[in-house]
Amino acid sequence: MAERPGLFTRWNQARRADGLALRRALPDRLLPLLVAAMTVLAALALAGATGAQILSARWSNGAASMLTIQVPDPDTPTTTAGTTTHLTRSDAVLAALADSPGASRVHRLDKAELGALLAPWLGQDHDFALTLPAIIELHMAAGTQTDATALARRLAAIAPGTLVERNAEWGERLGRLADSLHSCALLAVAIVAGIAVVLIAATTRAGLAARRLPIELIHAMGATDGYIAGRFARRTALLAFIGGLAGSGLALPILVLLSRVAAPFAAATPAPTPASSADWTMLAHTLLATLPTPLVATLLALAPAAALIGWLTTQATVRAWLRNLP
Amino acid sequence: MIRLRDVGFRYDAAGASGASAPVALRQISFEVPQGGFRWLLGPSGAGKSSLLRLLALTARPTSGTLEILGSSVAQARRAALARLRRRIGVVHQDFRLLPDLPVFDNIALPLRLQHRPEDEVRDEVHSILDWVGLASRATARPPQLSGGEQQRVAIARAVIHRPALLLADEPTNALDEYQANRLMELFRDLSGLGTTILVATHNDALIRRYPAHELELAQGRLLRDG
Ligand SMILES: Nc1ncnc2c1ncn2[C@@H]1O[C@H](COP(=O)(O)OP(=O)(O)OP(=O)(O)O)[C@@H](O)[C@H]1O
Ligand SMILES: [Mg+2]
């Protein structure tokens, strides 16, 4: 007697031998290839969306709600109506700012922070010969509108020469730009998903037409709609998953490159240089570490998402088609 | 058991045929008790295959009521119809074997659709292959078989799951007399075990050798029930 085949082999034989021959009915090279291409597109669009979101959050919440105030000669005492007071010019401005409505935080940059700010121009550990102006950051509570001109006028009265710089306008514009980029990117993802649905539905319909006779036969023998739809859906889900996996793999290096280019704008931690080691898991790990966490998550979700789209679309397509049989 | 009341059937008008869809069956009423055997007779084009289609639940009556194995077809849901179909065996006039599946897998189809264990499937298929005399052709594909061999595969596939209702459309037209007689013995055994059987045929010699209750159709009408 012949050796008994293993459980898995037997299960497989039974599956394949229902005459549907899905290996031939559904294009096992073209479908993964197209899904891979669409996955790359989706990954790029999602990267755009994530990047735009990060920039938007930063621009509209960080710089946007802050005013920078420069007080020259900060240590000179102020003069009020010709008389010298005991207050320095910077302290007088700070006191005035503390009272201003909507201020959530008033912070004068200390020596170290000033040094860091000027380092690009003057070098590290520079001992300043000149008296530097005091730089004060005025953080506004979210949603408050500040009249920068009025504030500048008020401060100039206390300490002539004080400058008020409003970062908000640019921040808001950039924030709006980032928001619309974000919406466009999501729209692109939705369009790619829509194309995937149409493509998989068309592929499934072609497969159904190609296997019309066996489908009609096993339907007549009592195969349920669920069985037939499930057979097709598992196959397209597998093909879409393979395509999604390949697409995410292709997209990864592109995204790493993009995120390195974008890193200075997002001002996240500087991207680590990939180790020169030939250890590929290390390399992959370093590559993934350069990407923002939400992007890594979406990248990992792409193949399962492709499989899910494939499964759902095929289920719906096959079940609708089977409705034509009695 | 099966029961028909005023069943009418016309092929779908859709397609090239346009509005002049032929009426295949009109006002057919009869009953067959469980384990009953019926010859289905009538000239070519009388509607025998059409009637068997309705009974096999692969077409729905245009009018009238149809009851198969105790279930009313009009009210049954799709899943219930599928369950009913699994209890029906059909030998098609044109065999309808799947050309790219080996004989073994063609015959195994009804058992696999019932998710029977593979060990059981193998034993059942081998014993029926022995019975139809095709044990040596298990791995052949249907196009490599003679007409009579294909018909025996179709018969094996129709009975392997011991259906409660067996519908055979000209099941002997490619068989020799010896094979035809063996088939009639099988029908007799199955009928004794409670399978309801309808056999459409033009084979007068066979009808004479195995006289039984006859349903005679002509131009879509039931002429005789007795
Ligand atoms: N698929 C179809 N579409 C349209 N009309 C059909 C179809 N099949 C059969 N008919 C018509 O229905 C009528 C009954 O045909 P049916 O096949 O039931 O006859 P039959 O009694 O089985 O004949 P035969 O003994 O030649 O097999 C015929 O007029 C035939 O032309
Ligand atoms: Mg016929």
Image (spheres, coloured by chain):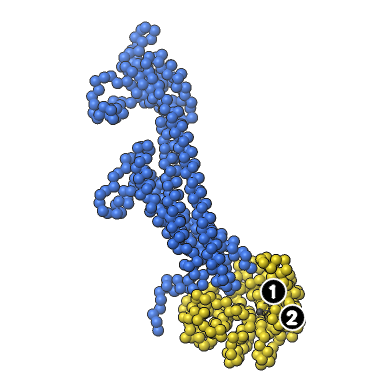
Residue B212 sits above or below residue A276 on the image: below
Residue lying at 41% horizontally and 46% vertically, measured from the top left = A295
Residues at discs 1 and 2 both on one chain: yes
Image coordinates for residue A35, horizontal then vertical, percent: 45, 56
Side of A270 relative to B141 (left or right): left
Chain in yellow (letter): B
Image quadrant containing the C terminus of chain A: bottom right
Image coordinates for residue A225, horizontal then vertical, percent: 57, 66
Q: Is mark 1 within 8 Å of ligand 1?
A: no
Q: Which residue is mark 2?
A: B218
Which chain is home to disc 2?
Answer: B
Side of A112 relative to A222 (left or right): left
Q: Are marks 1 and 2 in contact (CB under 8 Å)?
A: no
Residue A131 sits above or below residue B211 on the image: above
Q: Is mark 2 within 8 Å of ligand 1?
A: no
Image quadrant containing the N terminus of chain A: bottom left
Residue lying at 61% horizontally and 86% vertically, measured from the top left = B172
- What's the residue type where badge 2 is placed? Ala
Most foreground residue, B140 or A76: B140
Side of A273 relative to A200 (left or right): left
Q: Which residue is mark 1?
A: B67
Chain in blue (letter): A
Residue B110 visible in the shown view: yes
Asked where in the image residue A136 lies, by quadrant, the reply is top left
Residue lying at 41% horizontally and 32% vertically, measured from the top left = A62
Please name which of the two marks, 1 or 2, marks the residue nearer to the observer.
Answer: 2
